[in-house]
Amino acid sequence: MNDKQLVALHAAKYVKDGMLVGLGTGSTANFFIEELARLQQDQGLKFTTIASSTISAQKAQSLQLPIVAIEHVSSIDLYIDGADEITPDNTLLKGRGSDLVKEKLLAKAANQFIAVADASKLVSYIGQNFTIPIEVIPFAWQMAKKNLEAVGGIGDLRPNAAKDGFWITSHGSYVLDMRFDASINASTLNALINNTPGVVEHGIFHQLTSLVLIAQDGVVSER
Ligand code: 5RP
């Protein structure tokens, strides 16, 4: 079993009968979804799920997990999701794909948000290994980019896979992939991007986790 699977199985121990459980997106979250299906089948665990993406919803449905749509829900019991980066203060960078809007809604709506990752995701500062994905309303991208550049951001619109247009997220936004000076801390950066007109959402998840589970060489630690 690899570390991603191990940490996902550990997270599944937090699921209790009757819970409404948010499903993250990505390979670690997929292991969690598979474990939920096993617990439902083998142990009769009863829960309802809510997905952060179409791909996770499809996976949950294919495994016969009960699922509700996000528009019918204002709070959830538990959200389990992976991350691209995790800093020492448990700030996350997420959203390499197209689904960070629902991911952040679920992270905020959850009574308990548990981030799960292998140790490759640990970093000293946000933006160390990846650019920060910033979803913008398409017509606002130039103004948003200029305002982000004014606070030191460097980057551009993400191209689509064919490189003949721009990437469009699940919710119809463009994505600016931006780097910022490493000396700007996550809290300041979070506020700067939040305060930029035209920004729909971005990948910094600051002060949202209840717990972070890290698996390294077959051992899971909680922090
Ligand atoms: C998707 C995410 C994922 O959780 C993140 O990319 C980690 O993915 P993986 O578990 O495949 O390493 O934020 O928006």
Image (cartoon, grey):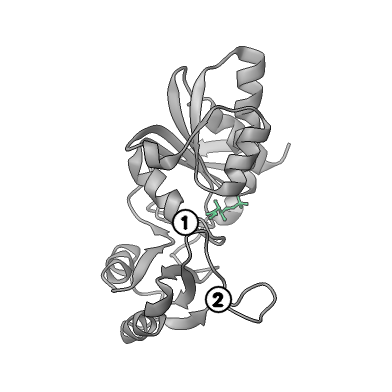
How many numbered discs, if any?
2
What is the crowding at mark 1: few (fewer than 14 residues within 10 Å), some, or many (at least 20)?
many
The x and y percentages for residue 94 are: 49, 57
Q: Earlier in the sequence, mark 2 or mark 1?
A: 1
Q: Is residue 45 above or below residue 223?
A: above
Residue of label 1: 100
Q: Is residue 185 left or right of residue 48?
A: left
Disc on res. 6: none
The x and y percentages for residue 212 are: 46, 42
Query: Residue shown at 45%/38% (left/top)?
Result: 79
Quarter holding the N terminus is top right
Labels 2 & 1 near each other (Cβ < 8 A) = no
Query: Residue shown at 35%/86% (left/top)?
Result: 146
Q: Is residue 106 above or below residue 144?
A: above
Viewer can see residue 217: no
Residue of label 2: 158
- Amino acid beneath label 2: Arg
Establish whether ligand 1 lies closer than 8 Å to the Cβ of label 1: yes
Q: CA distance from mark 2 to mark 1?
A: 15 Å
- Amino acid beneath label 1: Leu
What is the crowding at mark 2: few (fewer than 14 residues within 10 Å), some, or many (at least 20)?
some
Which is more toward the observer, 115 or 171?
171
User: Is label 2 in a helix, a strand or a loop?
Assistant: loop
Q: Is residue 178 above or below residue 186?
A: below
The x and y percentages for residue 119 are: 58, 50
Which is more toward the observer, 61 or 215?
61
* Location of residue 215 (image quadrant): top right
Which is more toward the observer, 208 or 23?
23
Quarter holding the C terminus is top left
The x and y percentages for residue 26 are: 61, 49
Viewer can see residue 82: yes
Query: Residue shown at 52%/52% (left/top)?
Result: 83
